[in-house]
Image (cartoon, grey):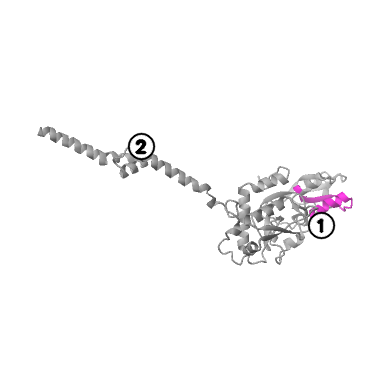
Amino acid sequence: MNMIRATAIAVLAVMLVACSGGGATTAPTTSPTSAATATAAPTATTAPTEAPTEEPTTAPTEEPTSSPSEAPTGSPAAGPVCENLPEGSEGDLLATICERGTILVSTDPNYAPQSFLNPDGTFEGFDIDTANEIGARLGVEVQFETPSFDAVVAGSWSDRWDISVGSVTITEEREEILDFTQAYYYTPAQIAVTTDSGITSIDALAGQPICVGSSTTYQYWLDGTLNLVGSPEPTPPPAGATAFPLGTDQDCAQSVQSGRSDFEAWLSSSTTIQAAIDADTPMVAVGDPVFFEALAVATDKSNADHDALQTALDEIIAAMHADGTLSASSMEWFDGLDLTVTE
């Protein structure tokens, strides 16, 4: 009997050792989760301990990645910027705009399909939609101003307008007097000729005047002074070709339509060229685009207190790229073309 009792005690001791330590020595080599479970509750079975630990560890870690709290500043998910001004924006132009409740935006009233003024006084176009969306994401109304393009790229705006959403190309010279957001779209520079000219190649324009908008990248290209930023290297202009500048690009098309043009060629954005051709201007595109340009929202460097506004604008443009707003608008205004990307 004593022998039986001793044997039973010995067996029980072995079992206790196995339950408290022996089984845990092999678990970490195959499953860290099982090891943690065995340490925390050695007497519990495997199924109840694994079910609660697996469920909460996946759901909470994935949820914050799409949480509205991480949405870019200025996006609809984050709410209007003016409702929660960034720290350090006191005294900045951004705070002034938010307090005023209106942002003054310069644009071109005669640059379809980017921007144009309707007979009823309303504005339409790709740039107009972009500006209105910027206003909405800031949380303010948009008031459009229509200075000459020369005045916009000259800087020293003297608070006559706050920003430019007028298809301003980023160049080295302009970066000295203006600050730019990241590009919100890209356009090819295209040459068109009158249908009566008989011209079929760009080389045939050697020594010819080519109509352009005054102080535009198109004029700089012909003058040999174009220094683009964030764009591919342009092709050289036709030998001896000269710029014939008018107030704005569409003035070139309207001169041809009126029959009073002193030129046979016109250089502008491919979108503006196509809009004029679609409006029955007797012109035709010739050759490949001569350069591609990155266009951005601009602010005036002479206003020293606009850093917070510049940051907010850049974040808004980034959010509009990310959520597809700019792509959708481009395809609406540019006949299904997405000019917000370079590929």
* The magenta stretch spans residue 248: yes
Query: Could you tell me which quadrant the C terminus lies in?
Result: top right
Q: Is residue 113 above or below residue 163?
A: above
Q: Secondary structure at mark 1?
A: strand
Most foreground residue, 333 or 276: 333
Say if residue 240 shows up in the picture.
no
- Contact flag, marks 1 and 2 (Cβ < 8 Å): no
Question: Could you say where residue 68 lies in the image, as x and y percent from the top left?
Answer: 54, 50
Most foreground residue, 95 or 294: 95
Most foreground residue, 301 or 196: 301
Q: Amino acid at mark 1?
A: Pro
User: In the visual, does 229 lie left or right of 266?
Assistant: left
User: In the visual, does 11 lie left or right of 62?
Assistant: left
Q: Dot 1, how many residues are within 10 Å of its Cα: few (below 14), some (14-19), or many (20+)? A: many
Which residue is painted at 61% across and 59% down in the image? Answer: 82
Query: Could you tell me which quadrant the N terminus lies in?
Result: top left
User: In the visual, does 154 lie left or right of 79?
Assistant: right
Q: Which mark is residue 47?
A: 2
Question: Could you say where residue 212 lies in the image, as x and y percent from the top left?
Answer: 80, 54
Say if residue 320 shows up in the picture.
yes
Q: Amino acid at mark 2?
A: Ala
Question: Could you say where residue 237 lies in the image, as x and y percent from the top left?
Answer: 77, 52
Q: Which residues are magenta?
A: 244-271
* The magenta stretch spans residue 197: no
Which residue is painted at 37% across and 39% down in the image? Answer: 50
Q: Secondary structure at mark 2?
A: helix
Q: Which mark is residue 245?
A: 1
